[in-house]
Image (spheres, helix red, strand yellow):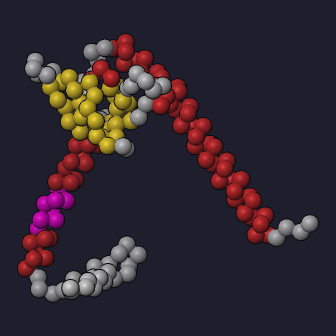
Amino acid sequence: MDMSVDQADEIVLNKIIKYRQQLITDIRKRFRSEYLGLLIQRNEHKKHGREIKLGEVVIIGSDNVKCTDWPLGFVIELLPGKDGVTRLVRLRTSKGELLRPVQRIFPLEVSSSWFKDYQQETTHENANNEVSSESFMNDTAPVTLKTKSGRTVKKPLKLDL
């Protein structure tokens, strides 16, 4: 039974891909079970520990889901109560936005300083875009749009009925 070199390479590559996928799932399971479990326990002991800040990455707690399956979220808005203390948080997850009480939010040990840097970069980019758009409006030369791969974009011809 002769097996070609291509088939042998395909079998080896499939084994490597399966091994890497299994390794990734094992690492995720271990991270969720060990690190997140410790993080949640640590936050329960503090009760009134660190204040949740805008732009923080948090774990979103839920009563009907195991803690290892709790999703991660990104704090996009803090909603204070009548006394001025933050009681509710608006979060962005991979599935959309939701509101959760502060008691069910567990902040990760990631600082939110990168969020401030990100905001500064986006405002700086927006300012640059406004300047470039003004100069673009004044230019009368046609601009050819190109895709990421370098192809020119052609405007589709529409039927004029």
- In the rendered view, does 20 fall on the left or right side of 107? right
User: Is 71 located above or below residue 114 in the figure?
Assistant: above
The residue shown at (32%, 43%) is 96
Residue 138: image location, x then y, percent: 7, 79
* Quadrant where the image shows the C terminus: bottom left
Which residue range is magenta in the image?
Answer: 124-131
Residue 20: image location, x then y, percent: 63, 48
Residue 6: image location, x then y, percent: 76, 69
User: Is 52 located above or below residue 142 in the figure?
Assistant: above
The residue shown at (30%, 20%) is 103
Q: Does the rendering let one see residue 113?
A: no
* Quadrant where the image shows the N terminus: bottom right
Question: Does the segment drawn in magenta span residue 160?
Answer: no
Q: Choose top left, top right, bottom left or bottom right for residue 75.
A: top left
The residue shown at (34%, 37%) is 73
Out of 94 and 140, give the one closest to the viewer.
94
User: Is 85 located above or below residue 54 in the figure?
Assistant: above
Residue 38: image location, x then y, percent: 46, 21
Out of 78 and 118, give the one closest to the viewer.
78
Chief secondary structure of the magenta portion: helix
The residue shown at (82%, 70%) is 4
Out of 76 and 154, give the one closest to the viewer.
154
- In the rendered view, does 10 fall on the left or right side of 57? right
